[in-house]
Amino acid sequence: MPPSYRSRPPALSVAMLVVLLGAPVMASAVEADMAALQRTVAAQHDASLKRLQDWIALPSIAAEDLNSREGAEYMATLAREAGFQKVSILDTDGKPGVFATLDAGAQKTVGLYFMYDVKQFDPAEWSSPPLESKLVDKPGLGKVLVGRGAVNQKGPQSALLAALHAIKAANQKMPVNLVLVAEGEEEIGSPHIGQLVHRPEVEAALRDTVGVFMPSASQDAEGNVTISLGAKGVIELELVASGEKWGRGPKKDVHSSLKAMVDSPAWRLVKALDTLVSDDGNTIAIDGYPVAPPISAEHKAMIAAATKVRSEAKSKKLLGVDHWIDDLPWQQANERLVSQPTVNIEGLVAGYTGPGGKTVLPSRAVAKMDFRLVPGMKKDDAVAALKAHLAKRGYGDIEVNVSGGYDGTQSSADAPLIQAQRAVLERRGIKPLFWPRNAGSYPGFVFTDAPLSLASGHFGLGNGSGAHAPDEYYLIESSNPAVQGYDGAVMSFVEYLYELGK
Protein backbone atom coordinates (compact mmCIF):
# COMPACT_ATOMS: atom_id res chain seq x y z
CA MET A 1 0.00 0.00 0.00
CA PRO A 2 1.18 3.54 -0.68
CA PRO A 3 2.55 5.31 2.40
CA SER A 4 -0.19 7.96 2.23
CA TYR A 5 -2.88 5.30 2.54
CA ARG A 6 -1.10 3.45 5.37
CA SER A 7 -1.04 6.71 7.39
CA ARG A 8 -4.83 7.08 7.38
CA PRO A 9 -5.97 4.44 9.92
CA PRO A 10 -4.25 6.08 12.95
CA ALA A 11 -5.72 9.44 12.02
CA LEU A 12 -9.15 7.90 11.61
CA SER A 13 -8.79 6.16 14.98
CA VAL A 14 -8.05 9.47 16.71
CA ALA A 15 -11.04 11.07 15.03
CA MET A 16 -13.23 8.13 16.05
CA LEU A 17 -12.03 8.40 19.66
CA VAL A 18 -13.05 12.06 19.74
CA VAL A 19 -16.49 11.18 18.43
CA LEU A 20 -16.92 8.27 20.85
CA LEU A 21 -15.55 10.02 23.92
CA GLY A 22 -17.18 13.38 23.16
CA ALA A 23 -16.34 16.98 23.93
CA PRO A 24 -14.49 16.37 27.24
CA VAL A 25 -11.47 15.17 25.24
CA MET A 26 -11.20 18.64 23.70
CA ALA A 27 -12.23 20.52 26.83
CA SER A 28 -9.76 18.87 29.19
CA ALA A 29 -7.04 21.29 28.14
CA VAL A 30 -8.94 24.18 29.68
CA GLU A 31 -10.09 22.60 32.93
CA ALA A 32 -8.74 24.16 36.12
CA ASP A 33 -8.62 23.63 39.85
CA MET A 34 -11.00 26.42 40.84
CA ALA A 35 -10.49 25.80 44.54
CA ALA A 36 -6.75 26.32 44.13
CA LEU A 37 -7.37 29.45 42.11
CA GLN A 38 -9.71 30.84 44.74
CA ARG A 39 -7.11 30.28 47.44
CA THR A 40 -4.52 32.03 45.29
CA VAL A 41 -6.81 34.99 44.65
CA ALA A 42 -7.37 35.36 48.40
CA ALA A 43 -3.63 35.09 49.11
CA GLN A 44 -2.89 37.80 46.52
CA HIS A 45 -5.64 40.16 47.76
CA ASP A 46 -3.35 42.71 49.39
CA ALA A 47 -0.95 42.79 46.44
CA SER A 48 -3.83 43.13 43.98
CA LEU A 49 -5.38 45.96 45.99
CA LYS A 50 -2.02 47.74 46.20
CA ARG A 51 -1.68 47.42 42.41
CA LEU A 52 -5.05 49.15 41.97
CA GLN A 53 -4.22 51.89 44.48
CA ASP A 54 -0.90 52.61 42.77
CA TRP A 55 -2.67 52.82 39.41
CA ILE A 56 -5.25 55.29 40.72
CA ALA A 57 -2.44 57.43 42.18
CA LEU A 58 -1.30 58.11 38.59
CA PRO A 59 -4.21 59.87 36.85
CA SER A 60 -4.02 60.16 33.07
CA ILE A 61 -6.50 62.84 31.97
CA ALA A 62 -6.66 63.33 28.22
CA ALA A 63 -8.79 66.49 28.48
CA GLU A 64 -6.06 68.14 30.57
CA ASP A 65 -3.14 66.62 28.64
CA LEU A 66 -1.99 65.10 31.94
CA ASN A 67 0.25 62.02 32.25
CA SER A 68 -0.73 60.43 28.95
CA ARG A 69 2.73 59.09 28.14
CA GLU A 70 3.23 58.05 31.75
CA GLY A 71 -0.20 56.38 31.75
CA ALA A 72 0.63 54.37 28.63
CA GLU A 73 3.97 53.28 30.08
CA TYR A 74 2.30 52.21 33.32
CA MET A 75 -0.36 50.28 31.39
CA ALA A 76 2.40 48.53 29.47
CA THR A 77 4.14 47.60 32.72
CA LEU A 78 0.90 46.20 34.16
CA ALA A 79 0.42 44.08 31.04
CA ARG A 80 3.96 42.67 31.18
CA GLU A 81 3.62 41.84 34.88
CA ALA A 82 0.32 40.03 34.16
CA GLY A 83 2.02 37.72 31.65
CA PHE A 84 1.68 39.38 28.25
CA GLN A 85 4.82 38.44 26.34
CA LYS A 86 4.66 41.13 23.64
CA VAL A 87 3.79 44.66 24.72
CA SER A 88 4.09 47.78 22.57
CA ILE A 89 3.28 51.45 23.08
CA LEU A 90 1.79 52.74 19.83
CA ASP A 91 1.71 56.43 19.01
CA THR A 92 -1.30 58.08 17.38
CA ASP A 93 -2.10 61.63 16.33
CA GLY A 94 -3.37 62.00 19.91
CA LYS A 95 -2.48 60.06 23.04
CA PRO A 96 -0.50 56.80 22.81
CA GLY A 97 -2.12 53.39 23.10
CA VAL A 98 -0.91 49.99 24.24
CA PHE A 99 -1.06 46.74 22.25
CA ALA A 100 -0.19 43.47 23.96
CA THR A 101 -0.54 39.75 23.25
CA LEU A 102 -0.42 36.71 25.50
CA ASP A 103 0.18 33.44 23.67
CA ALA A 104 -0.84 30.51 25.89
CA GLY A 105 -0.87 27.98 23.08
CA ALA A 106 -4.63 27.77 23.52
CA GLN A 107 -7.20 26.99 20.84
CA LYS A 108 -9.24 30.14 21.48
CA THR A 109 -8.18 33.79 21.52
CA VAL A 110 -10.06 36.55 23.31
CA GLY A 111 -9.78 40.31 22.84
CA LEU A 112 -9.62 42.80 25.72
CA TYR A 113 -10.38 46.52 25.54
CA PHE A 114 -8.90 48.70 28.30
CA MET A 115 -8.71 52.44 28.88
CA TYR A 116 -5.97 53.95 31.03
CA ASP A 117 -7.38 57.49 31.10
CA VAL A 118 -9.83 58.88 33.66
CA LYS A 119 -12.20 61.82 33.91
CA GLN A 120 -11.28 65.17 35.44
CA PHE A 121 -11.95 65.80 39.13
CA ASP A 122 -12.13 68.60 41.68
CA PRO A 123 -10.74 67.37 45.03
CA ALA A 124 -12.86 69.95 46.88
CA GLU A 125 -15.99 68.04 45.85
CA TRP A 126 -14.81 64.71 47.30
CA SER A 127 -15.28 63.45 50.85
CA SER A 128 -12.15 61.29 50.43
CA PRO A 129 -9.06 62.38 48.42
CA PRO A 130 -9.58 61.13 44.84
CA LEU A 131 -6.01 59.87 44.34
CA GLU A 132 -5.48 58.23 47.73
CA SER A 133 -7.79 55.22 47.21
CA LYS A 134 -8.91 55.08 50.82
CA LEU A 135 -11.13 52.24 52.01
CA VAL A 136 -14.40 53.65 53.32
CA ASP A 137 -17.41 51.95 54.93
CA LYS A 138 -20.51 52.36 52.76
CA PRO A 139 -23.78 51.41 54.52
CA GLY A 140 -25.64 48.60 52.81
CA LEU A 141 -22.64 47.61 50.65
CA GLY A 142 -19.53 47.13 52.76
CA LYS A 143 -16.02 48.50 52.43
CA VAL A 144 -15.39 50.44 49.22
CA LEU A 145 -12.32 52.00 47.62
CA VAL A 146 -12.94 55.67 46.81
CA GLY A 147 -10.90 57.21 44.00
CA ARG A 148 -11.00 58.61 40.51
CA GLY A 149 -11.04 55.66 38.13
CA ALA A 150 -12.13 53.24 40.88
CA VAL A 151 -14.99 51.79 38.84
CA ASN A 152 -14.41 53.53 35.51
CA GLN A 153 -12.31 51.55 34.69
CA LYS A 154 -9.25 50.81 36.75
CA GLY A 155 -10.99 48.71 39.42
CA PRO A 156 -12.55 46.14 37.07
CA GLN A 157 -9.49 46.16 34.81
CA SER A 158 -7.17 45.54 37.78
CA ALA A 159 -9.42 42.62 38.79
CA LEU A 160 -8.97 41.09 35.34
CA LEU A 161 -5.19 41.52 35.65
CA ALA A 162 -5.37 39.94 39.12
CA ALA A 163 -7.11 36.94 37.55
CA LEU A 164 -4.15 36.50 35.18
CA HIS A 165 -1.69 36.77 38.10
CA ALA A 166 -3.67 34.12 40.00
CA ILE A 167 -3.79 31.65 37.10
CA LYS A 168 -0.02 31.91 36.74
CA ALA A 169 0.72 31.73 40.49
CA ALA A 170 -1.55 28.70 40.93
CA ASN A 171 0.32 26.86 38.13
CA GLN A 172 -2.87 26.49 36.12
CA LYS A 173 -3.00 26.40 32.34
CA MET A 174 -4.08 29.67 30.79
CA PRO A 175 -7.29 28.71 28.93
CA VAL A 176 -7.17 31.32 26.15
CA ASN A 177 -4.75 33.50 24.28
CA LEU A 178 -5.30 37.23 24.81
CA VAL A 179 -5.07 40.34 22.65
CA LEU A 180 -5.16 43.63 24.58
CA VAL A 181 -5.83 47.09 23.18
CA ALA A 182 -5.68 49.97 25.68
CA GLU A 183 -6.28 53.61 24.81
CA GLY A 184 -5.79 56.89 26.65
CA GLU A 185 -8.57 58.97 25.08
CA GLU A 186 -11.82 57.21 26.00
CA GLU A 187 -12.93 60.10 28.19
CA ILE A 188 -12.67 62.55 25.30
CA GLY A 189 -14.56 60.41 22.78
CA SER A 190 -11.78 58.11 21.53
CA PRO A 191 -10.86 60.28 18.53
CA HIS A 192 -7.90 58.09 17.53
CA ILE A 193 -9.05 54.58 18.51
CA GLY A 194 -9.14 53.62 14.84
CA GLN A 195 -5.44 54.43 14.51
CA LEU A 196 -4.76 51.79 17.16
CA VAL A 197 -7.17 49.02 16.22
CA HIS A 198 -6.70 49.24 12.46
CA ARG A 199 -2.93 49.08 12.47
CA PRO A 200 -2.12 45.94 10.46
CA GLU A 201 -0.55 44.00 13.32
CA VAL A 202 -3.36 44.86 15.76
CA GLU A 203 -6.15 44.14 13.33
CA ALA A 204 -4.54 40.84 12.35
CA ALA A 205 -4.32 39.74 15.99
CA LEU A 206 -7.92 40.75 16.74
CA ARG A 207 -9.28 39.04 13.64
CA ASP A 208 -8.67 35.62 15.21
CA THR A 209 -10.53 36.38 18.45
CA VAL A 210 -13.98 35.14 19.49
CA GLY A 211 -14.77 38.74 20.40
CA VAL A 212 -13.64 41.65 22.57
CA PHE A 213 -14.82 42.49 26.06
CA MET A 214 -14.26 45.30 28.51
CA PRO A 215 -14.04 44.46 32.23
CA SER A 216 -16.86 45.98 34.28
CA ALA A 217 -18.63 45.85 37.64
CA SER A 218 -22.04 44.69 36.50
CA GLN A 219 -23.87 43.96 39.77
CA ASP A 220 -26.36 46.35 41.33
CA ALA A 221 -26.81 46.72 45.10
CA GLU A 222 -29.07 43.64 45.20
CA GLY A 223 -26.72 41.46 43.18
CA ASN A 224 -28.64 41.56 39.90
CA VAL A 225 -26.54 41.38 36.75
CA THR A 226 -27.32 42.93 33.38
CA ILE A 227 -25.75 41.66 30.16
CA SER A 228 -25.72 44.59 27.78
CA LEU A 229 -25.59 43.83 24.07
CA GLY A 230 -24.28 47.18 22.89
CA ALA A 231 -23.94 50.89 23.51
CA LYS A 232 -25.01 54.16 21.97
CA GLY A 233 -22.54 56.14 19.96
CA VAL A 234 -21.49 59.61 21.04
CA ILE A 235 -20.28 62.94 19.68
CA GLU A 236 -18.50 65.40 21.94
CA LEU A 237 -18.24 68.96 20.69
CA GLU A 238 -18.30 72.67 21.47
CA LEU A 239 -20.51 75.32 19.91
CA VAL A 240 -18.79 78.70 20.08
CA ALA A 241 -20.38 82.07 19.37
CA SER A 242 -18.02 85.04 19.24
CA GLY A 243 -18.16 88.65 18.21
CA GLU A 244 -15.05 88.08 16.11
CA LYS A 245 -16.56 85.26 13.97
CA TRP A 246 -20.04 86.79 13.89
CA GLY A 247 -18.88 90.25 12.81
CA ARG A 248 -21.35 91.71 15.32
CA GLY A 249 -21.06 92.15 19.06
CA PRO A 250 -17.78 92.93 20.82
CA LYS A 251 -14.43 91.35 19.97
CA LYS A 252 -13.53 91.65 23.65
CA ASP A 253 -15.63 91.79 26.82
CA VAL A 254 -17.19 95.23 27.32
CA HIS A 255 -19.35 96.93 29.97
CA SER A 256 -22.86 95.51 30.16
CA SER A 257 -24.47 98.94 29.86
CA LEU A 258 -23.46 98.83 26.20
CA LYS A 259 -26.02 96.05 25.57
CA ALA A 260 -28.39 98.89 24.68
CA MET A 261 -26.51 99.32 21.41
CA VAL A 262 -24.21 96.27 21.03
CA ASP A 263 -25.21 92.72 20.02
CA SER A 264 -24.54 89.80 22.43
CA PRO A 265 -22.72 86.62 21.34
CA ALA A 266 -24.05 84.91 24.48
CA TRP A 267 -27.69 85.53 23.49
CA ARG A 268 -26.83 84.44 19.94
CA LEU A 269 -25.60 81.11 21.24
CA VAL A 270 -28.69 80.66 23.41
CA LYS A 271 -30.99 81.37 20.45
CA ALA A 272 -29.04 78.94 18.24
CA LEU A 273 -29.21 76.22 20.88
CA ASP A 274 -32.98 76.67 21.10
CA THR A 275 -33.35 75.66 17.44
CA LEU A 276 -31.75 72.25 18.03
CA VAL A 277 -34.60 70.80 20.10
CA SER A 278 -38.34 71.01 20.70
CA ASP A 279 -39.76 73.53 23.18
CA ASP A 280 -39.42 71.06 26.05
CA GLY A 281 -35.85 70.23 25.07
CA ASN A 282 -36.60 66.52 24.68
CA THR A 283 -36.96 65.95 20.92
CA ILE A 284 -34.23 66.63 18.37
CA ALA A 285 -35.27 69.29 15.82
CA ILE A 286 -32.09 69.46 13.71
CA ASP A 287 -32.96 69.61 10.00
CA GLY A 288 -31.91 66.47 8.11
CA TYR A 289 -30.66 64.71 11.27
CA PRO A 290 -30.18 60.92 10.99
CA VAL A 291 -33.28 58.99 12.04
CA ALA A 292 -33.03 56.38 14.79
CA PRO A 293 -34.14 52.88 13.73
CA PRO A 294 -37.30 51.70 15.51
CA ILE A 295 -36.82 49.55 18.59
CA SER A 296 -37.18 45.84 17.80
CA ALA A 297 -39.71 43.47 19.37
CA GLU A 298 -36.79 41.45 20.80
CA HIS A 299 -35.35 44.50 22.53
CA LYS A 300 -38.77 45.57 23.81
CA ALA A 301 -39.19 42.15 25.39
CA MET A 302 -35.77 42.46 27.09
CA ILE A 303 -36.74 45.84 28.53
CA ALA A 304 -40.11 44.54 29.72
CA ALA A 305 -38.45 41.65 31.56
CA ALA A 306 -35.75 43.85 33.12
CA THR A 307 -38.06 46.61 34.32
CA LYS A 308 -40.15 44.05 36.21
CA VAL A 309 -37.06 43.27 38.30
CA ARG A 310 -35.52 46.73 38.61
CA SER A 311 -36.95 49.21 41.11
CA GLU A 312 -38.26 52.45 39.65
CA ALA A 313 -38.33 54.10 43.09
CA LYS A 314 -34.69 53.20 43.78
CA SER A 315 -33.63 54.44 40.35
CA LYS A 316 -35.34 57.78 40.91
CA LYS A 317 -33.75 58.13 44.33
CA LEU A 318 -30.29 57.24 42.99
CA LEU A 319 -30.61 59.80 40.18
CA GLY A 320 -32.29 62.45 42.30
CA VAL A 321 -35.28 62.84 39.97
CA ASP A 322 -39.03 62.82 40.55
CA HIS A 323 -40.29 62.46 36.98
CA TRP A 324 -39.30 60.85 33.70
CA ILE A 325 -39.76 62.73 30.42
CA ASP A 326 -43.47 63.26 29.70
CA ASP A 327 -44.19 61.41 32.97
CA LEU A 328 -43.73 58.16 31.07
CA PRO A 329 -44.38 54.87 32.88
CA TRP A 330 -41.27 52.94 33.99
CA GLN A 331 -41.15 50.52 31.06
CA GLN A 332 -41.79 53.16 28.42
CA ALA A 333 -39.19 55.47 29.97
CA ASN A 334 -36.61 52.69 29.61
CA GLU A 335 -37.66 52.02 26.03
CA ARG A 336 -36.99 55.69 25.36
CA LEU A 337 -33.63 55.46 27.16
CA VAL A 338 -32.54 52.63 24.88
CA SER A 339 -34.04 53.73 21.57
CA GLN A 340 -33.72 57.52 21.35
CA PRO A 341 -30.79 59.75 20.40
CA THR A 342 -30.09 62.80 22.56
CA VAL A 343 -28.79 66.36 22.35
CA ASN A 344 -27.40 67.35 25.75
CA ILE A 345 -25.83 70.53 27.07
CA GLU A 346 -22.98 69.56 29.39
CA GLY A 347 -22.11 73.13 30.31
CA LEU A 348 -22.51 76.77 29.29
CA VAL A 349 -19.66 79.22 29.72
CA ALA A 350 -19.71 82.94 29.00
CA GLY A 351 -18.38 86.01 30.73
CA TYR A 352 -18.05 86.13 34.48
CA THR A 353 -19.20 83.19 36.65
CA GLY A 354 -17.46 83.92 39.97
CA PRO A 355 -18.90 85.24 43.25
CA GLY A 356 -21.15 88.26 43.08
CA GLY A 357 -21.71 90.12 39.84
CA LYS A 358 -19.47 91.63 37.19
CA THR A 359 -21.28 93.80 34.68
CA VAL A 360 -19.81 92.66 31.38
CA LEU A 361 -21.17 91.88 27.95
CA PRO A 362 -19.16 88.76 26.98
CA SER A 363 -17.49 88.63 23.60
CA ARG A 364 -17.56 84.84 23.50
CA ALA A 365 -19.92 82.08 24.65
CA VAL A 366 -19.34 78.32 24.60
CA ALA A 367 -21.71 75.37 24.93
CA LYS A 368 -20.10 72.03 25.81
CA MET A 369 -22.34 69.35 24.32
CA ASP A 370 -22.71 65.62 23.76
CA PHE A 371 -24.94 63.86 21.25
CA ARG A 372 -25.86 60.19 21.81
CA LEU A 373 -26.51 58.05 18.74
CA VAL A 374 -28.48 54.83 18.41
CA PRO A 375 -26.77 52.05 16.41
CA GLY A 376 -27.66 52.64 12.78
CA MET A 377 -27.02 56.39 13.06
CA LYS A 378 -23.64 57.64 11.86
CA LYS A 379 -21.52 60.21 13.65
CA ASP A 380 -20.36 61.95 10.47
CA ASP A 381 -23.94 62.26 9.20
CA ALA A 382 -25.04 63.81 12.50
CA VAL A 383 -22.22 66.37 12.52
CA ALA A 384 -22.90 67.31 8.89
CA ALA A 385 -26.61 67.79 9.65
CA LEU A 386 -25.83 69.98 12.67
CA LYS A 387 -23.55 72.26 10.65
CA ALA A 388 -26.05 72.51 7.79
CA HIS A 389 -28.89 73.24 10.23
CA LEU A 390 -27.02 76.11 11.87
CA ALA A 391 -26.08 77.59 8.51
CA LYS A 392 -29.66 77.32 7.21
CA ARG A 393 -31.01 79.07 10.31
CA GLY A 394 -28.54 81.93 9.93
CA TYR A 395 -26.01 80.73 12.50
CA GLY A 396 -23.24 79.69 10.14
CA ASP A 397 -20.72 81.77 12.09
CA ILE A 398 -21.08 79.57 15.18
CA GLU A 399 -18.08 77.26 15.36
CA VAL A 400 -18.69 73.52 15.65
CA ASN A 401 -15.55 72.06 17.22
CA VAL A 402 -15.77 68.26 17.40
CA SER A 403 -13.35 66.81 19.96
CA GLY A 404 -14.30 63.13 19.68
CA GLY A 405 -16.97 60.56 19.06
CA TYR A 406 -17.96 57.38 17.28
CA ASP A 407 -20.88 55.26 16.11
CA GLY A 408 -22.92 52.92 18.30
CA THR A 409 -22.27 49.22 18.73
CA GLN A 410 -24.51 46.15 18.82
CA SER A 411 -23.89 42.42 19.32
CA SER A 412 -26.16 39.40 19.16
CA ALA A 413 -27.30 37.63 22.32
CA ASP A 414 -26.35 34.37 20.56
CA ALA A 415 -22.67 35.31 20.15
CA PRO A 416 -20.32 32.87 21.97
CA LEU A 417 -18.76 35.84 23.82
CA ILE A 418 -22.20 36.65 25.27
CA GLN A 419 -23.35 33.08 25.85
CA ALA A 420 -20.20 32.40 27.87
CA GLN A 421 -21.26 35.22 30.20
CA ARG A 422 -24.67 33.65 30.63
CA ALA A 423 -23.09 30.27 31.40
CA VAL A 424 -20.80 31.67 34.11
CA LEU A 425 -23.61 33.62 35.76
CA GLU A 426 -26.14 30.79 35.69
CA ARG A 427 -23.56 28.41 37.14
CA ARG A 428 -23.35 30.83 40.07
CA GLY A 429 -27.13 30.82 40.44
CA ILE A 430 -27.54 34.29 38.88
CA LYS A 431 -30.24 34.77 36.28
CA PRO A 432 -28.92 37.65 34.17
CA LEU A 433 -31.08 40.38 32.68
CA PHE A 434 -30.40 41.00 28.99
CA TRP A 435 -30.41 44.64 27.93
CA PRO A 436 -30.37 45.94 24.34
CA ARG A 437 -27.64 48.54 24.83
CA ASN A 438 -26.13 50.95 27.32
CA ALA A 439 -27.38 54.53 27.19
CA GLY A 440 -23.75 55.50 27.73
CA SER A 441 -21.03 54.92 25.18
CA TYR A 442 -17.76 53.14 24.57
CA PRO A 443 -15.89 52.72 21.27
CA GLY A 444 -16.89 49.11 20.61
CA PHE A 445 -17.77 50.05 17.03
CA VAL A 446 -14.13 49.51 16.02
CA PHE A 447 -14.61 45.85 16.90
CA THR A 448 -18.22 45.24 15.82
CA ASP A 449 -18.09 47.16 12.52
CA ALA A 450 -16.38 45.91 9.37
CA PRO A 451 -13.72 44.83 8.70
CA LEU A 452 -13.47 42.97 12.04
CA SER A 453 -17.23 42.41 12.63
CA LEU A 454 -16.63 40.86 16.06
CA ALA A 455 -18.93 40.52 19.04
CA SER A 456 -18.16 42.98 21.83
CA GLY A 457 -19.46 43.51 25.34
CA HIS A 458 -18.77 44.01 29.03
CA PHE A 459 -18.37 41.46 31.81
CA GLY A 460 -17.46 41.27 35.47
CA LEU A 461 -19.10 40.72 38.83
CA GLY A 462 -18.74 43.30 41.58
CA ASN A 463 -20.26 46.69 42.24
CA GLY A 464 -19.26 50.31 41.90
CA SER A 465 -20.68 53.70 41.06
CA GLY A 466 -19.92 57.41 40.73
CA ALA A 467 -18.19 57.35 37.35
CA HIS A 468 -17.39 60.93 36.30
CA ALA A 469 -18.68 62.15 39.69
CA PRO A 470 -17.22 62.89 43.13
CA ASP A 471 -16.68 59.93 45.49
CA GLU A 472 -16.45 57.35 42.71
CA TYR A 473 -16.08 53.94 44.33
CA TYR A 474 -15.45 50.22 43.74
CA LEU A 475 -16.61 47.57 46.20
CA ILE A 476 -13.74 45.72 47.94
CA GLU A 477 -15.33 43.87 50.88
CA SER A 478 -19.03 43.14 50.43
CA SER A 479 -21.49 42.93 53.31
CA ASN A 480 -24.07 41.30 51.01
CA PRO A 481 -23.34 37.67 50.00
CA ALA A 482 -25.22 38.26 46.74
CA VAL A 483 -22.82 41.02 45.69
CA GLN A 484 -19.18 40.20 45.02
CA GLY A 485 -16.31 42.15 46.51
CA TYR A 486 -12.89 42.45 44.89
CA ASP A 487 -11.84 38.80 45.18
CA GLY A 488 -15.23 37.67 43.89
CA ALA A 489 -14.84 39.97 40.90
CA VAL A 490 -11.40 38.48 40.23
CA MET A 491 -12.83 34.95 40.34
CA SER A 492 -15.61 35.94 37.92
CA PHE A 493 -12.93 36.82 35.37
CA VAL A 494 -11.11 33.54 36.04
CA GLU A 495 -14.33 31.62 35.41
CA TYR A 496 -15.17 33.66 32.31
CA LEU A 497 -11.79 33.05 30.70
CA TYR A 498 -12.09 29.30 31.30
CA GLU A 499 -15.61 29.30 29.92
CA LEU A 500 -14.45 31.14 26.80
CA GLY A 501 -11.70 28.56 26.38
CA LYS A 502 -14.15 25.66 26.11
Image (cartoon, helix red, strand yellow):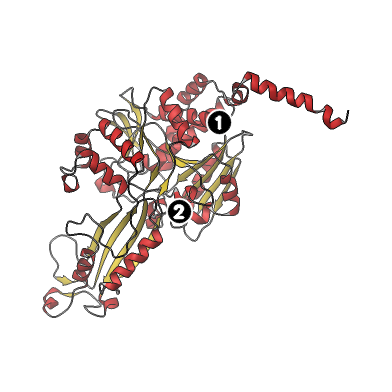
- The residue that appears at 63% across and 22% down in the rendered structure is 25
Q: 46 or 445, which lies in front?
A: 445
Say how many tags the image has.
2
From the top left corner, tell me how far across and down residue 476 is, in percent.
Answer: 36, 30
Q: Considering the numbered disc 2 on the image, is that residue within a helix, a strand or a loop?
A: helix
Q: Quadrant of the C terminus?
A: top right
**Residue 211 or 67: which is nearer the viewer?**
211
Element assignment for label 1: loop
Q: Position of residue 234 (x, y in %)?
A: 36, 54
Q: Camera-side residue: 300 or 472?
A: 300
Residue, disc 1: 501
Give the residue type that dot 1 points to: Gly
Distance CA(mark 2)–CA(mark 1): 34 Å
**Camera sees residue 470:** no
Above or below for 111 versus 49:
below
Q: Give the residue displayed 41% in from the left and 37% down from the top.
A: 156
The percent coordinates of residue 223 (x first, y second) are 32, 28
Q: Find residue 33 and report its horizontal and vertical position in percent.
A: 54, 20
| Quarter in which the N terminus is drawn | top right
Q: Is residue 24 visible?
A: yes
In the image, what residue occupies the spot 26% across and 42% down? 334
Q: Which mark is residue 68?
A: 2
Tell me the mark number nearer the camera, choosing from 2 and 1.
1
Question: In the picture, residue 426 is in which quadrant?
Answer: top left
195 in relation to 243, above or below: above
